[in-house]
Amino acid sequence: MSDPDQQLSPVEHIKRASRHLRGTIEQGLADRLTGALAPDDTQLSKFHGFYQQDDRDLRSERQKQKLEPAWSFMIRARVPAGRCTPAQWLAMDAIARTHANGTLRLTTRQAFQLHGVIKRGLRPTIRAINDSLLDTLAACGDVNRNVMASVNPWRSALHAQVAELADAVSAHLSPQTGAYHEIWLDGEKLAADAVDVEPIYGDTYLPRKFKMGFVVPPDNDIDVFSQDLGFVAIAGEDGALAGFNVIVGGGMGTTHGEPDTFPRLGDVIGRCRPDQVLAVSEGVVKVQRDFGDRTNRKHARMKYTIEDRGVEWFVQTLQAYIGFELEAAIPVRFIGTGDRLGWVQGDDGRWHYTQFIENGRLADRDGHTLLSAFREIAELGHGQFVLTPNQNVTVSALDDTQRADVEAVLERHGITRKGTLSALRRNSMACVGFPTCALSMAESERYLPDLVTRLEQILDAHGLAEAPIVIRMTGCPNGCARPFLAEIGLVGKAPGRYNLYLGAGFDGARLNRLYRENIDEDTIVAELDPLFARYAAEREGDEYFGDFLVRSGVIRAVTSGPDFRADEGRAA
Ligand code: SRM
Ligand code: SF4
């Protein structure tokens, strides 16, 4: 009989041997001969919140010169529910300018990313992040990642309650290892022969990353169906939080040409009370811990556990783990996945301003001073900041005077407002891609703005400038900008070439389908132009673009993840 241990993926062995994520990271930090860490430690570093990367713009030149790659690190700071104080924003801004590449990157999961930190900058950066009372532990790795929540907890009491629960679950599912404190924060060292415990995760953590989030309908800003575990808030008749529908088994990542990989929408499996959320979260994590596939990382996400074993099996197993049954889910309607940009007034009369940040990058460049503007807003010390699931930022809970102060800063910096952005751009999102992402096959963040400009001209010509079409681009099929839930999804195949996916639901409840494969910009435009023309001429009322493409037969609706590929003979 074959030894089951031998079938485990290599990362499983690295985790097991790591003494709860210690590995040889400390020794690697002290090694001045290289800008890199030891290969095994680059797997463990993810649990500490950072990735080793090299500058891909420089890679081949450095190879030619026989130089070590230009190593640097991407550091991700967890921000549960995206909430941070003006002081924390200022801290991240200062760290970005001191230790990183001078930009702040807001992510699709409401977190901060810093790029370009060199090895000797790791410890000061992680310390400074912790000094601001944010952290990087479990921002990446085979654990529960940053917990998302429908933005702006100050908008209503219900939003506030949901954000509190997101915080509580985030703390509950945080790894307990002392490794993080030992390595980065001068925590007391564990004796070499001693062990610490991970009560929820166990010694080898989860088979793969795990993601969860909370949503407050009718908004579906967190793309709740894309999460491993989603909670949909249900309000009682008095408007207070009454419970949550529970959704399991969503995920986006695929691999080109590997039909066993697919994006999947989560299944609604029932409903729980607010006081059961921690138990359900822990139970779901433990089911995945025990039944997820540890032999093949491309098949290790919870979506495959559920797809292979069935939803019924999952519910029965979960209920056995948590010791109670879920109630029947309550039907819920979502209206969209976007943010409410511009000024919005909350239930209590206070103001909330959401700024569109193109692809999440705050920088001072090309005559634009977005990074400085938000530093100045944070320096005012007014209200709170919320990072949104669409890579934008909300400045929350302002009175009339504070609103005027924020307005003045925006004016002074000439910040582009909602009214001057096309509906397509407002609904656009791109992952990082080149030059930092090791997995990128095509440009993404650096390219989508230009493609949108070209598409805007065509939409304008068809009278569609104000049609809110969701467009998302990624540099590879891992799906970091959730492109398979976009009405127009562009997924990098090779430099300058993309797969075009069409027909997702505007509400985030239907996947798109592959329409054309491996096409360049001119072909993308040539494919979309006639579809925009038909949409302008034939759409019914306020019908969304994705819905129109399905109704008119351009694309067949995707009803399950494995079915998202192109129809026979359609994609070429
Ligand atoms: Fe992601 C890997 C960036 C959200 C699916 N993702 C990566 C890495 C770390 C590349 C790597 O492994 O070397 C990227 C770093 C790029 C860089 O230079 O910064 C990266 N992912 C991002 C971010 C920054 C994209 C963005 O533009 O905002 C997002 C950070 C979120 C956060 O704050 O935690 C980000 N990644 C997502 C999402 C969207 C989401 O979670 O809502 C997904 C799809 C949902 C899902 O997980 O199914 C996503 N990222 C992946 C995958 C594919 C996982 C899979 O199941 O196959 C990878 C590759 C992997 O894990 O092997 C990946
Ligand atoms: Fe990198 Fe691919 Fe994620 Fe884009 S989708 S950030 S290219 S892993």
Image (tube, helix red, strand yellow):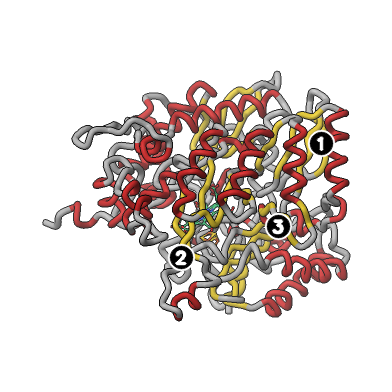
Q: Is mark 2 within 8 Å of ligand 1?
A: yes
Residue 306 visible in the displayed image: no
Kindly tell me whether mark 3's CB lies below 8 Å from ligand 1.
no
Q: Residue at x 63, y 48 (%)?
A: 106
Tell me the quadrant of the picture where the C terminus can be found: bottom right
User: Callout 2: helix, strand or loop?
Assistant: loop
The residue type indicated by label 1 comes to: Val
Q: Residue furthest top?
A: 238
Indicate which disc residue 344 carries.
1
Q: CA distance from mark 3 to mark 2?
A: 23 Å
Disc on res. 428: 3
Secondary structure of residue under mark 3: strand
Nearer to me, 117 or 462: 117
Tag shown at residue 255: 2
Left or right? Give the position of 318 relative to 267: left
Label 2 packing within 10 angstroms: few (<14), some (14-19), many (20+): some
For the residues bearing labels 3 and 2, Cβ distance under 8 angstroms: no
- Residue 162 in the image, given as x and y percentages of width and height: 61, 28
